[in-house]
Image: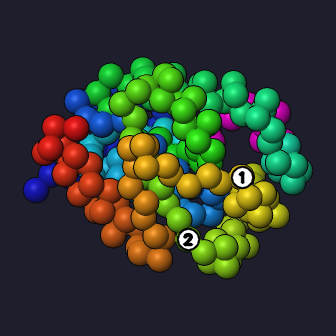
Amino acid sequence: MTEAPAPMRCSHDAAAAPRVVVMGVSAVGKSSVAIALAQRLAIPLCDADDLHPESNRAKMRGGVPLTDEDRWPWLDDVGRTIADADGGIVVACSALRRVYRDRLRAHAPDVVFVHLTGTAELLAERAAGRRGHFMPPALLASQLATLEPIAPDETAVVLDVTASVDELADAAVAWIGARSERGI
């Protein structure tokens, strides 16, 4: 049995595969699940946090929530990254509001979303335990307030993060595979 290649960060070269955004608020596990999913699908990985300009990072480090004006150029960069991935990509990106997901779909209409969810208490505990991340735990409440649930017309699966990273990645692979088998 051969091991899947390690995902590349924000690369555009890959074999035919889906375009997937692993989304949710801070501390939900987007990066961990995206890494596991990219490995299982053997396609590149991009963490959208890597595409934030320094001005956005500085605001967040300072405990200042981003405005939509801060996010639009970043979301366009993320959308172009997804669209340019000819053979598929997994992107970890908050994509909290419908309008943000629509902005990504404007660049890559075939993108699908894996929405990770958890209780505010669990996420606060996780955020408090993180070290070295530019997103301070104090901004979790603003992200939860901003989050808009997936609408019925959006192509997405919602997964509860009380499951392990492996279980979440396996569930996402199964959902993607079922969609592929149905030709959608």
Q: Residue at x 27, y 55 (%)?
A: 175
**How far apart, in angstroms, are the residues tagged by discs 2 and 1?**
15 Å
- Pick whichever of labels 2 and 1 is earlier in the sequence: 2
Residue 67: x and y in percent read 81, 38
Quarter the C terminus occupies: top left
Q: Is residue 23 above or below residue 180?
A: below
> Could one spot residue 34 in this view of the protein?
no
According to the picture, the residue beneath numbered tag 1 turns out to be 146
Task: In this rendered view, identify the residue nearer to me: 36 or 181.
Answer: 181
Q: Which residue is mark 2?
A: 118
Q: Are marks 2 and 1 in contact (CB under 8 Å)?
A: no
Principal secondary structure, stretch drawn in magenta = helix
Q: Nearer the viewer's eye, disc 2 or disc 1?
A: 1
Q: Is residue 96 something one can see in this rendering?
A: yes
Give left or right: position of 136 versus 168: right
> Quarter of the image holding residue 136?
bottom right
Which residue is depicted at the point 37% across and 65% down?
Answer: 168
Asked if the stretch drawn in magenta spans residue 113, the answer is no
Compared to residue 27, the image places residue 107 above or below, namely above
Residue 32 shown left or right of residue 75 in the figure? left
Quadrant location of the N terminus in the rendered image: bottom left
Q: Position of residue 172 (x, y in %)?
A: 32, 56
Three-letter code for the amino acid on which mark 1 is drawn: Thr
**Residue 8 appears left or right of 173:** right
Q: Counting other residues with Cα less than 10 Å from the Cα at mark 2, is it few (<14), some (14-19), or many (20 or more)?
A: some
> What range is drawn magenta here?
48-58
